[in-house]
Image (cartoon, helix red, strand yellow):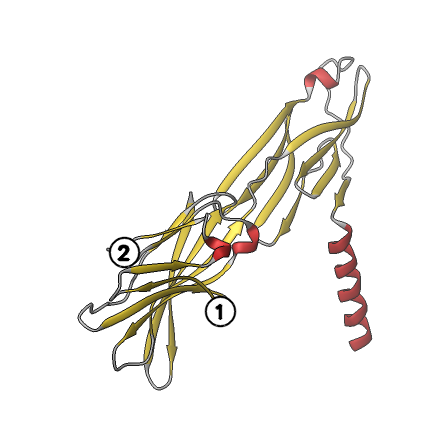
């Protein structure tokens, strides 16, 4: 599954270049198609590249396809439509992908442009940190984690953490608690029943309400936030 978006770039002298934004899950495949006109009468070559690195070069006259060693096992080129299929995409494959046509007597021209973002397929997980109950009260603390991020919260305290294109949220709803991770192409949730964690509670009293939520992030991200805040204070 992937999400598409089409955009236009306008520059002077007046030229309009359209490009497509694709958001794809890690390890999925995507097919990039030629969107501009290709006149085969004087066509010499078609070249697909990313970040100034050639992926495939197709010599039209000799009908030969040259694939970069780096991509040899992960791409398929269609000699009839000039489309490029990328397989087993990784996060490092995010970037700008372009197709250029080389026509005799003319400069190279862009006939397709894609901006690809590869997103992690992360499954959220709920674990119990601590639980305590009596006849008239109950306190449960849970850990909601996904990838390198975690949220720890006590009963009746919901919170969320947004990073890049993903969102991690932890919420309490009556007798259940939910841990949800989502991005533009994937939504996953882990839930847990609270009643078994409060065996002494009669069920006719509310859980203890204490607004507590802790956020755990990778140390690299924390350090970058500290540096950012320090620089901002110095500018003040």
Query: Residue 76: x and y, percent?
Result: 37, 50
Q: Residues within 10 Å of mark 1 (few under 14, many from 20)?
A: few
Element type at marker 1? loop
Q: Is residue 2 left or right of residue 152?
A: left
Between 70 and 17, which is closer to the camera in this rendering? 70
Residue drawn where x is 56% and y is 51% of the image: 91
Between 41 and 136, which is closer to the camera in this rendering? 41
Query: Residue 104: x and y, percent?
Result: 25, 78
Q: Quadrant of residue 204?
A: top right
Residue drawn where x is 75% and y is 45% of the image: 215
Q: Residues within 10 Å of mark 2 (few under 14, many from 20)?
A: some
Q: Quadrant of residue 168?
A: top right
**Mark linked to residue 79:** 2
Q: Quadrant of residue 170?
A: top right
Q: Upstream in the sequence, badge 2 or badge 1? A: 1
Per the image, the residue denoted by label 1 is 52
Gap between marks 2 and 1 measured at Cα: 22 Å
């Amino acid at each position: 599954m992937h999400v598409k978006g089409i955009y236009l770039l306008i520059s002077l002298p007046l030229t309009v270049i359209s490009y497509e934004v694709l958001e794809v899950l890690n390890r999925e495949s995507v097919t990039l198609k030629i969107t501009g006109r290709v006149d085969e009468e004087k066509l010499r070559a078609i070249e697909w590249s990313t970040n100034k690195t050639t992926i495939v070069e197709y010599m039209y006259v000799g009908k030969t396809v040259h694939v970069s060693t780096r991509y040899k096992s992960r791409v398929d080129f269609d000699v009839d439509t000039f489309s490029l299929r990328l397989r087993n995409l990784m996060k490092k494959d995010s970037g700008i992908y372009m197709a250029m046509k080389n026509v005799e007597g003319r400069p190279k021209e862009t006939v397709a442009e894609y901006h690809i973002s590869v997103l992690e397929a992360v499954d959220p997980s709920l674990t119990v940190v601590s639980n305590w109950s009596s006849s008239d009260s109950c306190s449960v603390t849970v850990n909601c984690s996904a990838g390198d991020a975690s949220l720890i919260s006590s009963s009746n305290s919901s919170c969320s953490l947004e990073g890049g294109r993903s969102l991690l949220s932890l919420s309490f709803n009556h007798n259940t608690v939910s841990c949800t991770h989502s991005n533009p192409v994937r939504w996953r949730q882990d839930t847990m029943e609270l009643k078994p964690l409060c065996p002494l509670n009669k069920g006719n009293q509310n859980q203890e309400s204490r607004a507590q939520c802790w956020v755990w992030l990778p140390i690299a991200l924390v350090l970058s936030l500290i540096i950012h805040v320090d620089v901002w204070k110095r500018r003040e």
